[in-house]
Image (cartoon, grey):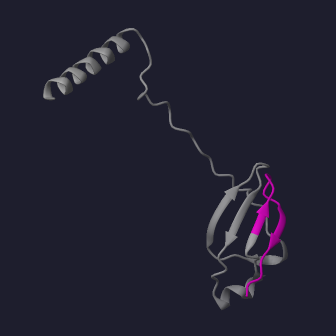
């Protein structure tokens, strides 16, 4: 049993060295990490002076619409600046609100 394990390790090591010498790309090779940039214009300003709480989640659908789950966990003093945003907010790819729904109660 030990011998077959050692033989397998040896074969794997030899085949890896041969593949590397032939220029075959390794399955473990990593490409450059993606670079992300912040878009300060996204999202657009919310309508009706909406005040959001923490966002509980988000997802992107097949049309690149962003769906935001607003937890609505705002303090009373924060609502002096506007009114409570709906529970769900849907944004188009440009960041404009196209649909919203949800009752705070």
Horizontal side, residue 37 vs residue 103: left or right: left
How many numbered circles are shown? 0
Please give the name of the residue rendered at 66% of the width and 62% of the height, measured from the top-left corner: 58
| Chain part drawn in magenta | 89-105
Q: Nearer the viewer, residue 66 or 80?
A: 66
**Looking at the image, which residue sits at the far top?**
22
Residue at far left of view: 2
Q: Quadrant of residue 97?
A: bottom right
Give residue 29's position: percent from left, percent from top: 43, 27
Residue drawn at x 68%, y 69% as measured from the top left: 69
> On the rendered structure, is 26 left or right of 40?
left
Look at the image and say whether residue 92 sits in the magenta stretch: yes
Quadrant of the rendering where the N terminus is positioned: top left
Give the image location of residue 25, x and y in percent.
Answer: 44, 19
Residue at 29% x, 21% y is: 12
Q: Is residue 6 left or right of residue 76?
A: left
Q: In which quadrant will I find the C terminus? A: bottom right
């Amino acid at each position: 049993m030990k011998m077959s394990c050692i033989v397998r390790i040896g074969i794997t090591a030899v085949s890896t060295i041969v593949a590397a010498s032939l220029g075959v790309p390794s399955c473990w090779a990593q490409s450059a990490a993606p670079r992300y940039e912040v878009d300060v214009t996204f999202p657009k300003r919310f309508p009706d002076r909406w005040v959001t709480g923490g966002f509980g989640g988000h997802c992107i659908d097949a049309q690149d619409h962003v769906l935001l789950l607003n937890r609505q966990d705002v303090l009373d003093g924060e609502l002096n600046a506007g009114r409570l945003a709906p529970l769900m907010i849907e944004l188009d790819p440009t960041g404009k609100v196209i649909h919203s729904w949800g009752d705070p109660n």
